[in-house]
Amino acid sequence: MARVISALSTGLVVGAFSIVVPVAIWPGEAKLTAPLFCSAPATEPMVVSDTFHDSDGTSTNYTLYCVGDHGMLTDEGFVLPMAVMLTAHVLIVAALVLLAAAFRRKAEPVADQPAGPEDAIEL
């Protein structure tokens, strides 16, 4: 049980840091969540970035839209797709940590057990 908790906590920390990928490096990762949020007839995902300049500086917002025929459009936002991506990142990292621990444990040699009375040799 301790290994599972350790793997999940590691997954949470690394998953939280990995959220930089969809926000800063590849916002289009939100398109991968489209099957959860886009339903017929608007099934084509599109991520749009809006950059604003004001006295506080520059900020960028990302929004997942589901587009259908004839310009039909639904705004799915970015909070729920981001939450789904964070959850997926945490689960993937936790699974990798558990697999690594299992392989490491399997590769460790078995320690010699002390001989018990049933293992004694009579002379």
Image: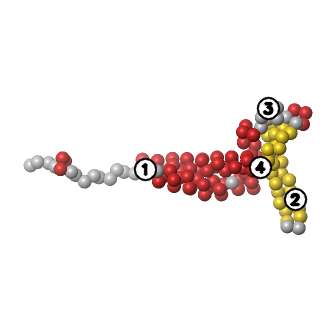
Q: Give the residue furthest to the right.
A: 70
Nearest to N terminus: mark 4 or mark 1: 4
The answer to whether the residues at label 4 and label 1 have Cβ atoms under 8 Å apart is no
- Give the amino acid at mark 2: Phe
Q: Secondary structure at mark 2?
A: strand
Q: Work out whether 58 lies above or below 70.
A: below
The answer to whether the residues at label 4 and label 2 have Cβ atoms under 8 Å apart is no
Residue holding disc 1: 105
Residue holding disc 3: 40
**Cα distance between the residues tagged 4 and 3:** 20 Å
| Mark number, residue 78 | 4
Q: Which x, y percent locates residue 19?
A: 69, 54
- Give the amino acid at mark 3: Ala
Nearest to N terminus: mark 2 or mark 3: 3
Nearest to N terminus: mark 4 or mark 3: 3
Circle 4: is it few (<14), some (14-19), or many (20+) Cα within 10 Å? some
**Cα distance between the residues tagged 1 and 2:** 51 Å
Name the residue at 72% across, 42% down.
33
